[in-house]
Image (spheres, grey):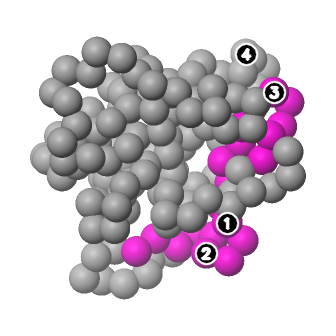
Amino acid sequence: MSKQVLANVTAVAIGGRALLIEGAPGLGKSSLALALIDRGAVLIGDDAIELVQEDGALIGAPPPNTSGLIEVRNIGLVELPTTHAPVALILQLDPDAPRFPMDVSTRQMASISVPVLTFAPGDATQALRAEYALAKHGLPFPSEAQAATRLTQ
């Protein structure tokens, strides 16, 4: 797969795995990313990410034109360190997300089936819930060797 840029998607790496955050403008993609960064996540990209298939994994990377920039509402653009990581989960922000998801759907991206979880935006525990979602529903590392490599980046 050649490089592909996804617009309107914010992504962070948590423990070396990429969490993609999708949603309509104003639902809080960047706010959730900032809350996760405050908890130790690393920015991959805000409002766009680059995807490439590498060694059987789908890797999320900073987009070349906005690498390292995140919009902080009412502040402006802020520069932060970035990383890249294998995509493990897509959180789809939706105010009508079910309280108890019965099933986690998947989306085919290249040849990888990535779990997609609808996710209620904007409450005070949003970042903590996102970490639990990744731990429970996210794809595992593609291999133990790659996991060790990703954790050091």
Taking the image as drawn, is residue 47 in sight? yes
For image coordinates 43% across by 81% down, the residue present is 77
The residues colored magenta run 52-71
Near-viewer residue (26 or 149): 26
Q: Nearer the viewer, mark 2 or mark 4?
A: 2
Q: CA gap, disc 2 to disc 3?
A: 26 Å
Rendered image: mark on residue 63: 1
Q: Position of residue 58 (x, y in %)?
A: 72, 37
Tell me, yes or no, whether the two marked residues, 4 and 3, touch with CB atoms within 8 Å.
Answer: no
Give the residue type at disc 2. Thr
Image mark for residue 66: 2
> Callout 1: 10 Å neighbours few (<14), some, many (20+)?
many
Residue at left offset 56%, top offset 40%: 18
Instruction: Please tell me whether residue 121 is drawn above or below residue 113 in the rendered image.
Output: below
Instruction: Quickly name the residue at label 3.
Output: 56
At which x and y percent is residue 36?
36, 47
- How packed mark 3 is, by other alpha carbons closer than 10 Å (few <14, some 14-19, many 20 or more), is few
Q: Residue at x 65, y 22 (%)?
A: 141
Earlier-in-chain disc, 2 versus 3: 3
